[in-house]
Image (tube, coloured by chain):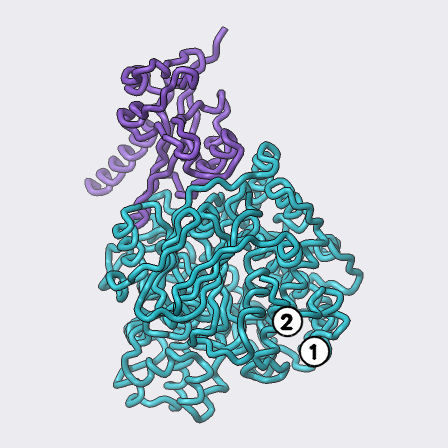
Amino acid sequence: MALNRKIAYIDLTTGEITAKPIPVEIRNKFIGGRGLDAYLLYNHTKQGVDPLGPDNVLLISGGLLTATCASATTRTHIMAKSALTGMLGSTNMGGFFAPELAWAGFHHLVIRGKAEKPVYLFIHNGEIQIRDAKNIWGKSVTETQWAIREELNDPEVKSLVIGPAGENLVRWANVMTGIKNSGGRSGMGCIMGSKNLKAVAVRGTMDVAIAHPVEALEYNKRFIDQITSSKVNQTMGTIGTPFIWGATNSWGGVRTRNFQFNQCDYSDDLEPERIDEIALETVGENHMAACFACQVHCRGKHRLPSGPYKGRYSEGPEYTSQGAFGAEPDCKHADTVLTCNYLVNEYGMDTLETGSMISWAMELMELGILTKEQTDGLDLRFGNDEALIEMIHRICHRKGWLANVLADGGLPAAEKIGKNSFDYLIQVKGMNNLHSDERGTPALALNIATASRGSDHLRSRPAIDLYHLPEPVLRKIYSSPIPYDGPLSSEQTDYEGKPWQVFWHENCYMAVDMLGICKYHTMFLGATHPNFEDWSRVVQLNTGLDYSPVHLWEAAVRCNMIERLFNLREGMTRYDLKKGEMLNHRYFDEPLQRGAPGVVGRKIDKKKFVKMVDEFYAHKGLDEKGAPKPETLKKLGLENEPSHLL
Amino acid sequence: MHEPNKVLKTDYNKCTGCRLCELVCAVKHDHVSNPTRSRIRVIKWESEGIYVPISCQQCEDAPCAIACPAKALSRNAERGRVEVDYDKCIGCRTCVSVCPFGAMHFVAADRKVIKCDLCDGDPQCVRFCDTKAVNLVDAGDVSLQKGREAAKRLQAADRTASTLVA
C-alpha cells in the first residue's frame, strides 16, 4: 500500500537512522512529495540556517502515487535550503529512482548532519546503510552509478548521485540519475556535497498494493490515451522538448546574447530538425527513451557527433540547453550545444544556470566590466564556442579567478565583480531566468517573478497562455475545481486575468508535485491534459483515499503557502531585487527588438506589473507585502506552523 | 473451431525502456505494483541506451517442460502457451535454470515460479506499449515485418549504389 511507505530520518554526523510511518492526518494535509517536503523543511530547519552547514536538511521523496498503477508518476523531489539563493531550494526529476525507493519501503528521506568522510546511502527493502564512498568520490555522474552497481553487485540498483561539481560545491550543482535525468535548479547537488554524501542508492522488491487494481489498470489506459492523443505529446515523443525551440524562437521569445535580443538569428543549426537529424544519424530511427512507466518518451538519445567526446553516448538535449548553450552565449552550433549538454550532465551541474552565468560574464566582457586578466586570458566573447566549453570545465573545477567567482552563484559573483555587473544579471531571488524572454508575455513574467524557488518556469507558468485559446475554453479550465468569474483573456500580451491563471497553475503544478506526476501530463503544455478531477479519481483507485478535486486544490494552496512561509522566514521582501518578487530593470526599460510584428517593441509595463502582483497576492490571501494574512493561515490550517508533528 | 495461435513478438529497437509493461503485468496478475512479479522484463544497457524486453517465447519444444521433474509444465496448444500446473509444481526452480531466455521467474515473496500466460489472449504489455515494441502476431507472420525492414534497407542500398554509378 502506498500509505504504508515510511519516512526515514538519517543523521550523517551521528550515523543514527530511524523510520516512522506517515500518519494519514498529515497525508490529508500535505499529501506527499514536494508538499510534504515543504512541511518537513519548514519544521526541521531554523531561520538563517547555513545552507552548507550540518543543520540544513536534505529531503528526498516520491509522490503519493509513485509506484502505483498510474503512469508517469516517477518524479523524485528533493528539497533543502538552497545553496544558490539562501531561500527555498527544490528540484523535481524523472528517471527510475522514486518508484525504486517506494518498492524499498520509503516515500520520504530526511537527511541531516555531515559525514566525516565521503559516504553513500544504500537503501534495500526497509534497511538503510551508510557506506564508505572512497571508491566513487571524484567520479563523474555515470561512472559513479555504474561503480555503485558493481560494488553492490546488482545491476538493478538506482542511484541519485552528484558529480565533481557537487563535490566542489558549485552552488548550482545538480543531483543526477541515469544518463541525464537532472535534479537541477537551486543547487541540491551542492547540499549533498556539503554533507559529504556522494550518492543515495536504492533497490526495492516489496509490493505496493493497489486499492482497486482492476479499475486502476483500466483507468490508467484511459489516462494514457488522453495524453498520447494530444499533438503536443506526440511531437514531444518524437523529438523531445527541442520542438519548443522552433515556435518560440520564430515569434521572438528566446533571449539572446544574455538579454540583448529576443531571438537567436541565423540559428538553423539549433532547430529541432537538426537535433533530430543527429539522433537519426548516430542512433537510428528509434531514438527516444522514457522515464518509468511513461508513454510520452520525451528523452532523445544520440552519440556526440564531433569534438573531444565524439562517439560517446548521451541523452538530450532539452529545450533549456538549446537556449543556455546556443542562444544566450550566441554559439549557434548543435555540436557545441551537445558537447556542453554532455559535460554538464557528467559533471552534474545545472544546464540553465551554467549557460546563463557564462553568458552574463560574456556581456560583462563586452561592456568592459570584466577584463582579460580576470578571465586568465580567455577570450570570453559572445559566439566563442571554445571559450564557452572551457568555462564549463573551469567552473566545475573552480579553476581560475572568474570561474571560482561564478561557481558561487549570481548574487555573490555580482558583489565580487562589482561595478554595475548586477544590472546585467537576469535573475529573480538569486536564480537565473530560463532563456525564454517574457517581455511580450505578462503572464509568464508574473510567473517567474513570483516562483517560490527563484526565477522558474516550472512552478506556475501558464504556458498554454501562448495558444490563444478561445475564452470559453479558458473559462472551462480556470473555473475548476474552484469557481472563478473574474476576467480572462485569450491575448497573451494582456495583463487582465493573468494573475488568476498564474495562481491556478501554481496550484496545478504543486498538486502534481505532491502526487509525483510529471508536468507533461498536466495542463502545462497540453490544454486537454488530465486535471484535478482525473487526479482525484487516480488517487482513489490506487490508494483508496477519497480526495475530492477541491481537497487536492486546497492542499496545493496550503503547500504553496508553506513554501512562501519558508521564504519569508529567510528574508523575502516584495520589491527587493535580490530576494523579492521583482524583475530585472531590462524587462521594463528595454523593448523587444526582434520577432513577430506583434512582439517587436513590447516590454513589461511596470505599473501594470505591480498591479498584477497585487492581484496575485489577493488571490493567495496575502497582504500587500506578500505575507499571508492571519485569516488565510487559519483557513489553510497553518496558524500553528511549525507544528513539529513529523 | 479454434483461433490461430498468436505469439508475442518483441521489436527491441522500438523499446523506450519505460517498463510500463512490467508495471501492468504485475498489476494484472498479482494486483500489486512490483516489477519483480512481472512476467516480462526489460533488460537494459543504460550506458548505451539499449533496452530489450524479454518474455516467454512459449517454445514448441520447451526446455522448462522437458526439464521439469514434476511434469508441472506443459504445452496448451489451443491457447498457444506453456503453462504451470501449480498443483504439481514443487518449486525446485529447474525451469528457471534451463530457460534459455531467463523468462521463467521465481517470486521470492510467494516462493513460486511465474511465467507469461499471454493474459489469456489479451496481453497487457502489448495493450499498453505505446511504441509497439511488444506485439501479438499470428505465429506465421512473425518474420513478416522483419523481412519488410530488410527489404527497405536493400532498396536504400540500391538507391545509394545507383547514385554512385550515376
Nearer to us in this view, A194 or A370: A194
Q: Are marks 1 and 2 in contact (CB under 8 Å)?
A: yes
Q: From this viewpoint, is residue A587 visible? A: no
Residue picked out by circle 2: A442
Q: Secondary structure at mark 2?
A: helix
Residue most toward the bottom? Answer: A419
Q: Secondary structure at mark 1?
A: helix
Residue picked out by circle 1: A608
Could you tell me which chain the residue with mark 1 belongs to?
A
Name the spot of residue B99 as percent of width and height, x first: 29, 25
Name the spot of residue A510 as percent of width and height, x first: 60, 60
Q: Report which quarter residue B165 is drawn in.
A: top left
Nearer to us in this view, A247 or A390: A390
Q: CA gap, disc 1 to disc 2? A: 9 Å
Residue A348 as seen in the image, left or right of residue A506:
left
Above or below A18: residue A353: below
Q: Amino acid at mark 2?
A: Pro
Above or below A48: residue A110: above
Chain the render paints purple:
B
Residue most toward the left? Answer: B165
Residue at left 77%, top 60%? A484
Q: From this viewpoint, is residue A421 visible? A: yes
Above or below A258: residue A336: above
Q: Earlier in the sequence, mark 1 or mark 2?
A: 2
Label 2 environment density (alpha carbons within 10 Å; few <14, some 14–19, many ≥20): many
Label 1 environment density (alpha carbons within 10 Å; few <14, some 14–19, many ≥20): some
Residue at left 79%, top 64%? A486
Please give the count of numbered marks on the rendered protein: 2
